[in-house]
Amino acid sequence: MAFTVVGKSVARVDAIAKVTGQAKYASDFLERNMLVGKILRSPYAHALVKNIEVSKAKALPGVEAVLTYKDVPQNKFATAGHPYALDPKHRDKEDRTILTNKARFVGDAIAAVVATDELIAEEALKLIEVEYEVLEPVFDPEEAMREGAPKIHEDCERNIVSSTGYEIGDIEEAFKEADYIFEGQYETSIVQHCQLENHVACAYVDSDGRIVIITSTQIPHIVRRIVAQALGIPWGRVRVIKPYVGGGFGSKQDVCLEPLVAAMTLAVGGRPVKLELSREECMIDTRTRHAIRYKIKTGVSKDGKLIGMHIIAISNTGAYASHGHSILMAGGSKFRVLYPMKALKYEPYTVYTNLPVAGAMRGYGSPQITFAVECHLEDIARKLNMDPIEFRKKNLVQVGYVDPLNGNVVRSCGIRECIEKGKELIKWEEKKERYKNQTGYRRRGLGMACFSYASGTYPAGQEIAGARIVLNQDGSIQLQIGAAEIGQGSDTVFAQMAAEILGIPVDMVHVISTQDTDITPFDTGAYASRQTYITGMAVRKAALEVKEKILDFACSMTGIPAHALDIKDQNIVYKDTGNVVMPLSEVALRSYYDLVSAQPITSDVSNNARVNAYTFGATFVEVEVDIRTGKIEILEIYNVHDSGKIINPQLAEGQVHGGVSMGIGYALLEQMLFDEKTGKPLNNNLLDYKLPSIMDIPEIGVAFVETFEPTGPFGNKSLGEPPVLPVAPAIRNAVLDATGVAFNRLPLYPQRVFEKFKEAGLI
Amino acid sequence: MAFTVVGKSVARVDAIAKVTGQAKYASDFLERNMLVGKILRSPYAHALVKNIEVSKAKALPGVEAVLTYKDVPQNKFATAGHPYALDPKHRDKEDRTILTNKARFVGDAIAAVVATDELIAEEALKLIEVEYEVLEPVFDPEEAMREGAPKIHEDCERNIVSSTGYEIGDIEEAFKEADYIFEGQYETSIVQHCQLENHVACAYVDSDGRIVIITSTQIPHIVRRIVAQALGIPWGRVRVIKPYVGGGFGSKQDVCLEPLVAAMTLAVGGRPVKLELSREECMIDTRTRHAIRYKIKTGVSKDGKLIGMHIIAISNTGAYASHGHSILMAGGSKFRVLYPMKALKYEPYTVYTNLPVAGAMRGYGSPQITFAVECHLEDIARKLNMDPIEFRKKNLVQVGYVDPLNGNVVRSCGIRECIEKGKELIKWEEKKERYKNQTGYRRRGLGMACFSYASGTYPAGQEIAGARIVLNQDGSIQLQIGAAEIGQGSDTVFAQMAAEILGIPVDMVHVISTQDTDITPFDTGAYASRQTYITGMAVRKAALEVKEKILDFACSMTGIPAHALDIKDQNIVYKDTGNVVMPLSEVALRSYYDLVSAQPITSDVSNNARVNAYTFGATFVEVEVDIRTGKIEILEIYNVHDSGKIINPQLAEGQVHGGVSMGIGYALLEQMLFDEKTGKPLNNNLLDYKLPSIMDIPEIGVAFVETFEPTGPFGNKSLGEPPVLPVAPAIRNAVLDATGVAFNRLPLYPQRVFEKFKEAGLI
């Protein structure tokens, strides 16, 4: 299909605003005499508040309010950024209150103050006297599951949030049928999103008593609902405004601050309050990525076909459920389409511990399971003495495959081409040959890993999106979408889509980037790599409706049937010859001012997408390992993606760069550390937490295999999260290739690598 | 028709916000480092700028830009707040540039500065050196029309903006047929709106180079167009935001500041600039009410029937055309339906002079002509020795009357009932009898006057309005209208209309009061008393569409046909029995979250109303005149209105109170004074300009005769402007009744009254 604007690397619509500092973020929200909120956090990982005395804090001049659990509604609510479910069984676990009298991790919010400035607020926190009854904490999920383990939530048996899983086929039968059985254990670490912009929200009460929240969120419409639920008020009495957001990566697909800042403004008669977390607070009291331990058992036939797999996954969800089990289930669902097997048993356990709350993070359970499975398959291939790539290829999915559990169909699949492209880019065969017989302390190796992922959450979640278009008198448009631009570039691709259909240049599409639940078409938000695919459908629908109205109006002016007309380069043209009938602006102007037939042209559509599209890809990496120091250097790395049609190659490449960097950090450097006895965070700051810097990241190669996904609005599929998925296992597999040592736990940081090499006798 | 919410005096939706100071006005717009704009004004009424030297001003630290006519586009544009006309012949006169090198009145904008604060800006103005060539000015329109008078605009013959008029029937034939011929001359003064909030606008350039203007305006969508025209850029590249407005009365139905503030921000690289006029500046350089001189000749039959009338109207439009001739034509059109005559010749002249620019003001030409005609009829009745009320009643319009020029139809008319009600309230007969033979220096008298007016501008102007509704999950709605709340209460009546149709209480209607041309449904704005009638139709249409969607959704849930359902008290009910089927919120919730059929319910409608509705009423007043001092005291005053169905009696009463106060000021106190030689304003401040204070205003009686206007969205017709129309002539007629002295020139301030009494031999 030939496109004019779609498929071009047009500049981001927000580029200038962002590089000049003109773009407004939540923290830029200006109000006269805005108050400042601060949170008092538990120093204990597990403790009861026996007594809390706030009179001294209240007496401090400049303190406007002090809040404890006694001062806020005690409605239990869930914070996960999911669409509301009519079916109570499908709702997230409601285990939070705005403030708690039982601390469940070091940093849990016990009390809060609102003061005229930050220093007074900090001072007031010190004046709050809390008497704790310290309880025994538990940090490891398997320990937390044991009978007699400390009980973190009263209503929860053995601290298991959920253990709902699935079984496809009969796993025991499959194992009987298999020629070989392999087992492995793989484990990922707790990491943090480290998005550029910390969590911040401002709130005030407007003229008719409604609460207005300006917040850095991925999910404005969901924030609205959850704040109302937390406060126990009608949803329509909350208004959420999302300005530009400086990154989220899932951390802001959760309602972390908003109920509290709402309670704060209510406590001070509706005056504006700003609640802004420091980086240190963000790292412990927003969300982390779940550390998950996998125990995998796999049956394989002699000819290298996967017969059956049994995965036990134990996820450390921390102190509150948040997205908890959804993440374990999403990971357990999205990976399985890549290598269809006769039998697959997935046995997941999402478990509370006294650590910070884990939640959504780019990939949403998939980086973890992709690490486990792609390491496991590599290990099997090597044990079978098969080429690991050939082994994978034997088991890859085909177009037409229907997932037996959710019914999703593989309608486009370029994974084979991705693998070929990756091999070619990295010169796989040539280097394999060259590195065959290495000796010495610096050894090179090649690794790869594949992934499958979905585009949105259907059918697990509802996929509704809205778009509204207003045609201006000059033929330009405003495009209002409910979906959230959080730095990923969605506003730009939506502008391209609308421009494509309406025959205008992108700079005539004025995207209203600010989402405001009062007026923005409903959309559940930025997550699950859904926006270009799901919201794209709504944008397409809205633009087509506007186009139809324009052509109908042109027909009423000229008599030429609408079906014979099209819009090209801002002109109404004959569809067949391209001859210009009149400028688009003439139709637009008349649609406003014709004395008889005026009817300004707009559309306001919602689209309930009951479809999903699988996306595929692979990482190919070459490493050099210094056996003496445990240092792993990435020499070359390529991500090759089948994301269907690429809407904006440059933005797409940017997404891949970001994802690969994140994957490299995940593979080699990042982990949140806690004191083993007390659960106190040891590195919740950007000095001690080893986020890769630009010096740690090599040049990243990116390639796309452009399939055409028939359900995508322009043949496109997801791309936001996928790039992170296959990076860590590919690096791990390359290290294995170089050294013969298999690392089954992330990250591969020098100390761990060095110790393992010693253990393996390499040193 | 029985209504639930319509017809009730619900509290203003913005009441709390406004009395607590929470409501945001344009001047409350906050930006970091906002610059300040100031205007250099001509000290001469008529002068050419020979030379202008700005280097000293530019050199002053803190001055960011100095602008003269050389620095701004010289596109000629019209400032009147009218919908754009596709037909060039129907466009307003384009006689302005953003800054001028020819001053046409004292205060004309010659140059402007942008500086970091107000004091520096003021200082910089003093450093601009202008060399003027002073020209002869002309202030009286009849003098300005003479051959050889000073030419104010090069392309304008005899300074006449327009003299287009009309003739119904044959006036000369009518005069021949008449038994009596009467002549009179009547004259009104220049007055100023004196709305609470001065003119203010802020502007900046946003991320994609678009100009954003936050302005106190009645006409945001029109401002957008005119700023673009003035700058010569596509209309879509301007965005106008209208926050709460502190009154306009027509002064803000004109584009006074916005092109200049836009030029200012462009001059400083798009940084935010605020341009706020002082009261003194507002009074000379926004708009005034046209002073109009009427020469009327009327033919009457023996039995008191009006046969024909010839009106010559000479309007002083000041230095620029603005609404100029439209006002003279509107006045000449709306009054004529009250007393249909065989022949009516209207001969209007809108004339430039070297005085401040006259423009739209509450009543838009009708207060002037109503004064002239209602004085003239009173005089005729008295000369004929007829009861003035009986004389009027003989000539009043009947339902079914069709205006021969514009085709508008009188579909509802309660003028006779208004007159009866007024007589009754003021005890007309009884007091007439009592005051028959007064002597002494304090004499009482009764007067009355009638009016007719329209609801909107159709067919002279296009009447398009838009409304958008979003149904929330709890059954509450957001209502977004393009029409402008400027203090008149329109948001509240729109909320009532939507609530009425949707069966919800008003506090579940969240009105988005801020208009933003990017996202607000298109509406031409607040003028011509159009909003409740014209925009009301759009609100009704939008609410009905939402209701239909709700009932269809309820049908899909229950199987009960939508036609059997209704919404009452937030419940879906059986239409016939009222039995509850389910809560509205259940439908609303499901419309968002049903996995299969979810489709959030919204409407986004535009309505092109090709209809108009005549509204009627009368003022009845009792005065006591102190002949020795010329002081006129109003003892009782009643306005009785037929505005169709009254949507909110308390708000309606408020409108009448405001209009009557304005009418009393017009009758007794207000006039802008200028030095006769130089044209310098003598009283452009609220100390010297005699706006009536609360001490000058008596208790105002208000009554409504509620007809049901079939074309009104709820049987309603206009009410915003009408209250001011009949007040001045009624007072004048009462003074005549008390003293026998006819005042034919406004205002009746003590000095003029005293002199005239002396002349008449009363003193």
Image (cartoon, coloured by chain):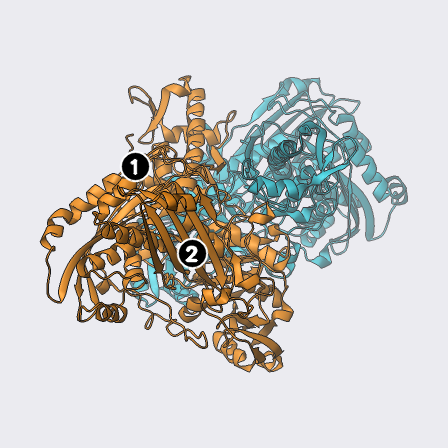
Chain colours: A orange, B cyan
Q: Left or right of B671: which side holds A603?
A: left
- Depth-wise, is mark 2 or mark 1 nearer the camera? 2
User: Looking at the image, which is closer to me, B427 or A201?
Assistant: A201
Marks 2, 1 in one chain: yes
The reply, left or right, for residue A372 in relation to residue B664 is: left
On the image, the x and y values in percent for residue A712 come to 38, 36
* Secondary-structure class at tag 2: strand
Give the image location of residue A458, x and y in percent: 46, 41
Question: What's the residue at 65%, 42% (across, down)?
Answer: B586
Marks 2 and 1 sit apart, C-alpha to C-alpha, by 44 Å
Q: What residue type is labelled 2?
A: Ala
Give the residue pinned by disc 1.
Answer: A5
Within 10 Å of disc 1 (Cα), the crowding (few <14, some 14-19, many 20+) is: many
State the image quarter where residue A475 is shown: top left
Q: In this view, does A594 lie above or below A228?
A: above
Residue A373 drawn above or below residue B59 = above
Residue B282 appears in the rendering: no
Residue B124 located left or right of residue B312: left
In which quadrant of the rendered image does the C terminus of chain A lie?
A: bottom left
Residue B575, by quadrant, is top right
Q: Residue B458 versus residue B421: which sits nearer the camera?
A: B458
Query: From the viewer's perspective, is A584 left or right of B575?
Result: left
Does the CB distance between marks 2 and 1 fall below 8 Å?
no
Taking the image as drawn, is residue A500 in sight? yes
**Residue with the mark numbered 2:** A313
Specify the label residue B195 is tagged with: none
Q: x and y percent of residue B689 in the render?
A: 60, 56
The image shows residue B355, relative to residue B87, as above or below, that is below
